[in-house]
Image (cartoon, rainbow, N blue to C red):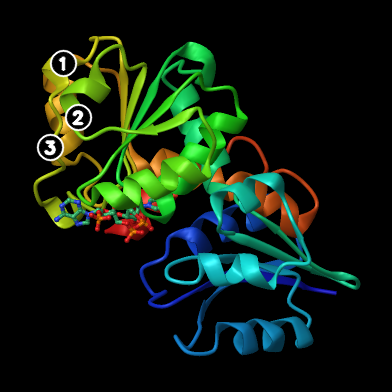
Amino acid sequence: MKVIAGVVGNPIAHSLSPAIHNAWIVAAGLDAEYEPFLAPLDDFAGFVADLRDKGVRGVNVTIPFKEEALALASTPSDLARMAGAANVLVFHDGGIRADNTDGKGLLEALATQGFQPGDGPAVILGAGGAARGAAAALVLAGSPQVRIVNRTRERAHALAASLGDKVLDYQHAEDAFADAAVIINATSLGLGGGEGPHAPFECAPGSAVVMDMVYKPLVTDFLDKAAERGHPTVDGLEMLIGQAKPSFEAFFGRPPPAGIDVRAIALEAMR
Ligand code: NAP
């Protein structure tokens, strides 16, 4: 029987996930389909229950439902619990499994520039859902310290306090950047080609890997300034593809097929 999975969000038309997953489905020769699902803002739970009743195997979850998705889970992963959000729900007879593969995608993306969490302190700009997921993934993977810098300091403080003594909030990026091994933009600044967050790269070691979660445009103001100073950089599309891989495996019971240039496919879908 055809396996149906998809991505639930609001809005959803912009999502690149269907292009990525359907390319893998075709290449793997699966009898399956991955669809975009637009859920009403006021009834995510009812919408998900309906998908489940219709026999959908599982869904990715995107803005603004990731926190609500975690609340629906009967068995959340450690990462989803720590992140306080889930982007994967898999339905089974006994209930709903939830995971957060955004953090896994982040680590996979950073590994393309040789970064490993144990390499040194990580700086995260932002304290929203994406920052929380990133901090949780870095801590679970062995980061010695995660430094949160955010416009609203109280939010950074609350995030740090909830994730244990390895996560600290910093008032000034200048202090946080000193001896950083990785610097990540997890704010929404830079989206659509706007200016990125305040980033004093001159205070960071030249070896620090710099990553932007924003991927529209692919080369953001933040990455442009980092590259100008010679930092190795990673774009947000690598993270998006990185999170899709374990999601695919959760829905279809096998890893995505090798040898498919999903980055090129995603770039084409972004046009
Ligand atoms: P969110 O919960 O709304 O958080 C937004 C963050 O941006 C907050 O820290 C906020 O600071 C900060 N911010 C917004 N406007 C600002 C401004 N004018 N000046 C300074 N800071 C500002 O959003 P999110 O879900 O964490 O997502 C953040 C970004 O990551 C989005 O662009 C999203 O698309 C991207 N993302 C990418 C991936 C991927 O796979 N590449 C995955 C997840 C998310 P305050 O707390 O002070 O408001």
Dividing the picture into quarters, in which one does residue 85 lie? bottom right
Q: Is residue 98 left or right of residue 105?
A: right
Tell me the residue at 45%/23% (across/down). Answer: 145
Q: Is residue 118 left or right of residue 146?
A: right
Question: What residue does disc 1 label?
Answer: 203
Question: What residue does disc 3 label?
Answer: 198
Cβ–Cβ under 8 Å for marks 3 and 2: yes
Q: Quadrant of the N terminus?
A: bottom right
Dividing the picture into quarters, in which one does residue 110 lie? top left
Image coordinates of residue 125 in percent, x first then y, are 28, 39
Image coordinates of residue 184 in percent, x first then y, are 33, 34
Residue 262 visible (yes or no) = no
Q: With respect to residue 187, does 50 lie above or below?
A: below
| Ligand 1 image-quadrant field | bottom left
Determine which of the numbered discs, if any, sits on residue 173 in the image.
2
- Say few, some or many: other residues with alpha carbon within 10 Å of mark 3 (under 14 / 14 to 19 / 20 or more): some
User: Label 2 amino acid?
Assistant: Ala
Q: Quadrant of the C terminus?
A: bottom left
User: Label 1 amino acid?
Assistant: Cys
Mark 3 vs ligand 1: CB below 8 Å: no
Secondary structure under the numbered disc 1 in the rendered image: helix
Residues at marks 3 and 2, CA–CA distance in whole angstroms: 8 Å
Tell me the residue at 36%/42% (across/down). Answer: 236
Q: Is residue 6 left or right of residue 202?
A: right
User: Label 3 amino acid?
Assistant: His
Q: Is residue 74 left or right of residue 159?
A: right
Cβ–Cβ under 8 Å for marks 1 and 2: yes
Tell me the residue at 64%/70% (across/down). Answer: 71
Mark 1 vs ligand 1: CB below 8 Å: no
